Image (cartoon, rainbow, N blue to C red):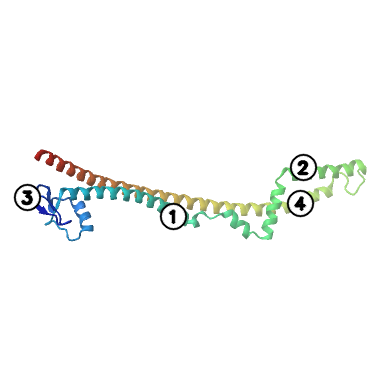
């Protein structure tokens, strides 16, 4: 029986199992040359050795694909967590930068716009009127039509209005910053979604190319098996 010597393992194989390097598909040939740099298209190997490298190529491809998915997830998560400047917490920053006047304005606006203030001030007016009309029979320090009470109410309104406006102006500025922050977050999300789409498209294209190569390798293996069966 005629034999030949494999240029990869230097072992003897039947001449019917000889495969030329020229007939090996380029991806498989590149894979073989990684482990056997001396192997070229002018060399020969056995069908069993070629099938071994084919199976190893497919196995490494599957392992690599799982690893690529893991790396993709890590990249996306790192991109989301590292860029924290786009999601600054305005509330915390605003609270630390408030002046004493701004804090007082917020408290006055909060209290002046509550039912507690309305009920307490209504009780104060009722007690004031009751004391002057009923208790002192309208001969007290502020008889009807209660000029002193009107003066107090006017002074209170004159002071309270600008204080509330100060708080509202600061709240509007805070809302503008929050809207700007929301815009930046939305823009960041849009860019990341686009990047994710590009990565997925690239991954799909890469997988399709690799799967086509694997199918061609498997078809080559089946053809070799059919040829062997036909020879027998």
The residue under label 2 is 119
Residue 23 pos. (x, y %):
13, 50
SS of the residue at dot 4?
Answer: helix
Q: Position of residue 194 (x, y in %)?
A: 38, 49
Looking at the image, tell me whether mark 1 or mark 2 is earlier in sequence order: 1
Expressed as whole percent of the image width and height from the top left, the position of residue 57 reads 25, 50
Residue holding disc 3: 2
- Residue named by callout 4: 156
Tell me the mark number nearer the camera, choosing from 4 and 2: 2
User: Mark 3 falls on what kind of element?
Assistant: loop
* 1 or 4: mark nearer the eye: 1
Rendered image quadrant of residue 9:
bottom left
Q: CA distance from mark 1 to mark 2?
A: 54 Å
Mark 1, Cα crowd under 10 Å, few <14 / some 14-19 / many 20+, is few
Marks 4 and 2 sit apart, C-alpha to C-alpha, by 16 Å
**Residue 142 located left or right of residue 8:** right
Spot the residue most to the front: 1
Q: Is residue 42 left or right of residue 115?
A: left
Q: Nearer the viewer, mark 4 or mark 3?
A: 3
Mark 1 and mark 4 lie on one chain; the one further toward the N terminus is 1
Label 1 sits on a secondary structure element that is: helix
Residue at 89% from the left image edge and 42% from the top image edge: 133
- Count residues near mark 2 (Cα–Cα under 10 Å), then give few for <14, some for 14-19, many for 20+: few
N-term-proximal mark, 4 vs 2: 2
Label annotation for residue 78: 1
The tag on residue 199 is none
* Nearer to me, 19 or 191: 19
Mark 3, Cα crowd under 10 Å, few <14 / some 14-19 / many 20+, is: few
């Amino acid at each position: 029986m005629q034999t030949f010597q494999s240029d990869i393992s230097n072992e003897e194989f039947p001449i019917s199992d000889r495969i030329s390097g020229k007939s090996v598909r380029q991806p498989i040939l590149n894979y073989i040359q990684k482990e056997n740099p001396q192997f070229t298209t002018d060399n020969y190997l056995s069908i069993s050795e070629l099938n071994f490298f084919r199976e190893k190529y497919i196995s490494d491809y599957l392992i690599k694909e799982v690893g690529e998915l893991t790396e993709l997830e890590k990249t996306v998560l790192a991109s989301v967590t590292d860029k924290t400047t786009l999601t600054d917490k305005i509330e915390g920053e605003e609270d630390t930068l408030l002046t004493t006047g701004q804090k007082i304005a917020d408290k006055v606006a909060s209290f002046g716009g509550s039912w507690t203030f309305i009920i307490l001030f209504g009780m104060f007016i009722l007690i004031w009127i009751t004391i002057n009309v009923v208790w002192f029979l309208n001969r007290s320090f502020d008889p009807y039509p209660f000029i002193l009470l009107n003066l107090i109410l006017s002074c209170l309104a004159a002071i309270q209005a600008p204080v509330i406006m100060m708080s509202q102006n600061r709240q509007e500025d805070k809302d503008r910053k929050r809207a700007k922050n929301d815009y930046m977050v939305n823009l960041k999300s849009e860019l990341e979604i686009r990047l994710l789409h590009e990565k997925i498209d690239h991954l799909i294209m890469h997988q399709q190319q690799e799967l086509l190569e694997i199918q061609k390798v498997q078809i080559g293996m089946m053809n070799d098996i059919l040829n062997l069966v036909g020879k027998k």
